[in-house]
Image (cartoon, helix red, strand yellow):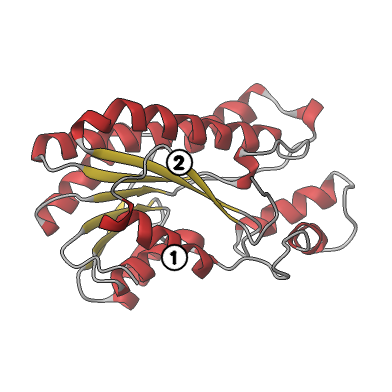
Amino acid sequence: MADLDGRAIVVTGAARGIGAALARGLAAAGASVALADRDLDGARAVADEIGGRAIALSVEVTERATVRAMIATTVAAFGRLDVVFNNAGIVETRDFLEISESDWRRMLDVNALGCLIGMQEAARRMIDQGGGGKIVNTASIAGRQGSPALAHYSASKFAVVSLTQSGARALATHGITVNAICPGVVETGMWDIIDRGYQEQGLTEEPGEAFRTLAARAVLGRPSQPADLVGIATFLASPGSDFMTGQSLVVDGGIVMQ
């Protein structure tokens, strides 16, 4: 595994699921990690489990002031900011014809605007301190292929892929790379929400059916676990990825192939 000794990293949405797994893996590789989440108690529990140079911070990714405070506190604790993982996000299912303006705004605000604000504030800090940096966004295979039951979620993740490319071009002259990870069907609490939505829309009949059906598309023969994203995250945080930018890397067990 890549050596991240001395790297100061922020992970948003770190109280559970993919974010918590990333924080654990990055810390195990030697990084100092700030776990940021609107659920501060949850982030603290994971940070306490990690120990060492792990801290927990409160953040609302759609509120710029709290994102700035998150970064300032990280720098005060660790001395600098090297990598930010914009991982926080929400999911919701809706019949395509029933997506409302408020559904759309909430989804795009958290998943797309929240990502943009995180990128902007991280980049400002990295530019001020000099020496470049790395920004990694969590997109999804839903940002590669649209879904009628998840249209506004898919749109928000397509936006994350686009922001990744735009940010990579905008920030390259400052030595800042921007990449994204596109997970597939990952066994987290988000899939409880998706499963319930599929049942409510009459697309499935049994609890867990949507998860099992969609996970079965992975040619590697099993659902993804949050820990499956740690390897690519560690690589993207390490010097090994210094010449990679603007890429959205699919890690889904072979559901979507490019």
Q: Where is residue 245 in the image (x, y as percent from the top left)?
A: 37, 40
- Lateral position of residue 204 relative to residue 212, left or right: right
Residue 49, above or below 254? below
Marker disc for residue 220: none
Residue 169, above or below 78? above
Q: Position of residue 194 (x, y in %)?
A: 71, 51
For disc 2, the marked residue is: 247
Task: Judge whether residue 232 can be spotted in this image.
Answer: yes
Task: Depth check: give the residue in front, 57 or 209.
Answer: 209
Residue 120, above or below 230? above
Marker disc for residue 230: 1
Quadrant in the rendering for residue 173: top left
- In this rendering, which labeled residue sits more in front, label 1 or label 2? 2
The tally of labels here is: 2
Query: In the image, what residue occupies the spot 12% across and 51% down?
Result: 80
For badge 1, the amino acid type reads: Val
Q: Where is residue 165 in the image (x, y as percent from the top left)?
A: 43, 31
Q: What element carries label 1?
A: helix
- Distance of mark 1 from mark 2, alpha carbons? 17 Å
- Lateral position of residue 226 relative to residue 104, left or right: left
Query: Which label's residue is closer to the chain start, 1 or 2?
Result: 1
- Lateral position of residue 186 relative to residue 132, left or right: right
Task: Depth check: give the residue in front, 160 or 202.
Answer: 160
Q: Where is residue 244 in the image (x, y as percent from the top left)?
A: 36, 44
Quadrant in the rendering for residue 94: top right
For badge 2, the amino acid type reads: Gln
Q: Using a 10 Å C-alpha cutoff, classify the residue at mark 2 as few (fewer than 14 neighbours), some (14 to 19) or many (20 or more).
A: some
Task: Depth check: give the residue in front, 27 or 177.
Answer: 177
